[in-house]
Amino acid sequence: MKRFYLPLLMVALFYSDSLFAAAFPETAFEGKYMIVPHFFLVGLLFMSIFFDRNTAIKYGFLFGFLFDIFYTGILGAYMFFLPLIVYIVSKLVKVLQNHLFILSFIVLFGVFLLELIMFQLNVLVERTEMDLTQFTSIRLWPTLLLNLIFYLLLAIPLKSAFEKLRRIYND
């Protein structure tokens, strides 16, 4: 039974993105800002840091594929870039300290990378009318702020959950 905790946690984080987006639609801020929750990505990055990088890459690939199917029109974008960001962040953590304060910057960098890559892909396939300055002020900063708040609220519980799961899976 304990082996199901990791998939359940990741499914809960996956659905939390869409639940938050449904609770706070784009008109919540009078249409001025677009906030995009990346709670699953934050959880995936915590998994790569405190559990196992290779497992996080596999989960990123699987859930990225699901994310592409359900939410985006570009099949393979999240499926490729979620594992790539997990890999990059795991390498950054090895170079920098594994402290929650430092990790906040690293996790926000991962969210920043994903947002920037997805924006550039949408520009490439002409699915957006925004330029880079509009994207930065309307979408990037509010998204980073939201995910920072999520990080501040759940960093310690996520860290302890993944450390407990690592002990369970290693036993």
Image (tube, rainbow, N blue to C red):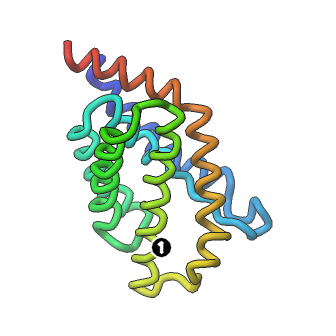
Describe residue 168's horizontal placement relative to residue 126 as left or right: left
Which residue position is annotated with label 1? 119
Relative vertical location of residue 157 with respect to residue 76 in this rendering, above or below:
above
Describe residue 122's horizontal placement relative to residue 21 as left or right: left
Mark 1 lies on a secondary structure that is helix
Which quadrant holds the N terminus?
A: top left
Which quadrant holds the C terminus?
A: top left
Residue at position x 41%, y 69% in the image: 117
| Type of amino acid under label 1 | Phe
- 4 or 34, which is in the foreground? 34
Visible residue check, residue 1: no
Q: Residues within 10 Å of mark 1 (few under 14, many from 20)?
A: some
Residue at position x 43%, y 48% in the image: 41
**Residue 39: image x %, image y %?**
50, 45
Describe residue 15's horizontal placement relative to residue 140 as left or right: left
Residue at position x 39%, y 42% in the image: 45
**Residue 112: image x %, image y %?**
49, 59
Occupied quadrant, residue 150: top right
- 132 or 43, which is in the foreground? 132
Visible residue check, residue 141: yes
